[in-house]
Image (cartoon, rainbow, N blue to C red):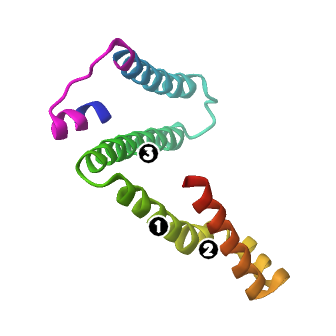
Amino acid sequence: STVFLRKMIFGSNITGKGKLFGVLMCILGGLLCLQGDVHHNQIDDTNRDLSHDSQIYLHGDLLALVAAFLYGLNDVLAEYFVKNNDRIEYLGMLGLFGWIFSFCVQAPILEGEAVRELVTKFGQRQSDIMESDFLWVLFLLFC
């Protein structure tokens, strides 16, 4: 997807044998994954509901394709914004919104129990200090 999106946005083609080899390897890997799913369904137990298994594999393959497209879109848009805007501002906004998403959305949903345990174990003030220390370490790491 990166190749096609790059062609649409920048108007440039794949340059170099290494990139072409990488694209071909990705396509080959996707085809092997699809072939493995089909082969698994053919040798599976006849007592199981094969249509349900096929739907699960289809959903997994579709999610993998969507993820690959979104990853390619992210690469192309990142290249576009870095070329056309200030790099420091881009990386700063990426870090800021990444932090907001990580602490305000991802952590409560995926790590809610661990966050509650941290607050109850150390208290609200101590957990705020730990979060602040973590942010300073990230800041110093990326400076």
Residue shown at 45% from the left, 38% from the top: 61
Q: Residue 63 carries which label?
A: 3
Residue type at mark 2?
A: Pro
Over which residues does the magenta segment extend?
A: 5-19
Q: Is 97 colored magenta in this rendering?
A: no
Q: Residues within 10 Å of mark 2 (few under 14, many from 20)?
A: some
Q: Looking at the picture, how far across and down is residue 126, in whole percent?
A: 77, 82
Q: Is mark 2 on a helix, strand or loop?
A: helix
Locate residue 139 relative to residue 20 in the image: left or right: right
Question: Which label was assigned to residue 108?
Answer: 2
- Residue 95, position in %: x, y? 48, 61
- Rendered position, 71 above or below 36: below
Q: Residues within 10 Å of mark 1 (few under 14, many from 20)?
A: few
Q: Position of residue 93 (x, y in %)?
A: 40, 63
Camera sees residue 139 = yes
Residue at mark 3 to residue at mark 1: CA–CA distance = 28 Å
Q: Where 86 falls versus 63 (above or below)? A: below
In the figure, residue 141 lies in which quadrant?
bottom right
Q: Helix, strand or loop at disc 1?
A: helix
> Which callout, 3 or 2, points to the residue nearer the camera?
2
Q: Which mark is residue 96?
A: 1
Q: Disc 1 marks which amino acid? A: Leu
